[in-house]
Image: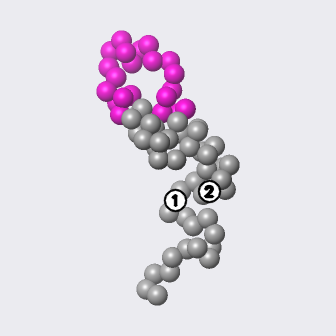
Amino acid sequence: MNELFFRHQMALMAVGRMRGASARHADFDLPGHYADRIDAYRVRRGMSKYFAVAARPEAAPTIGA
């Protein structure tokens, strides 16, 4: 999972730096590709989309306890 997050972040930064001819010729959405792979990984493992939401209610931390 960390590898997918890393590659997604690197792809996002690379797209942000693309200007001129490089940007016009980039026809493959690499950040979108990694986002799809991350979502598929989460679905296969029954994980929630956002890690801030507990996958199981009993696993949620209690505040002030």
Residue at the far bottom in the pictured view: 65
Residue type marked 2: Met
User: What separation in Å lies between label 1 and label 2 (alpha carbons)?
Assistant: 8 Å
* Magenta: main secondary structure: helix
Q: Residue at position x 61%, y 65% from top? A: 55
Percent position (x, y) of residue 10?
Answer: 39, 35
Q: Percent from the top left, x then y, of residue 5?
A: 46, 44
* Residue 15 lies in the magenta stretch: yes
Nearest the eye: 8 or 19: 8
Measured from the top left, where is residue 46 in percent x and y? 67, 56
Q: Are marks 1 and 2 in contact (CB under 8 Å)?
A: yes
Note whether 23 is above or below 14 in the view shown: above
Q: Which residue is mark 2?
A: 47
Residue 59's disc number: none
Tell me what residue is drawn at x 63 percent, y 43 percent: 40
Left or right of residue 30: residue 56: right
Residue 32 % position (x, y): 52, 33
Residue 57 shown left or right of residue 1 in the figure: right
Q: Residue at x 45, y 38 (%)?
A: 8
Q: What residue is disc 1 on? A: 51
Quarter of the rendering containing residue 59: bottom right
Task: Identify the magenta region.
Answer: 12-33
Residue 2: in magenta span:
no
Q: Is residue 17 visible?
A: yes
Number of numbered discs on residues: 2
59 lies above or below 2:
below
Give the SS element for disc 2: loop
Circle 1 sits in a helix, a strand or a loop, which is it?
Answer: loop
Q: Residue at x 58, y 38 (%)?
A: 36
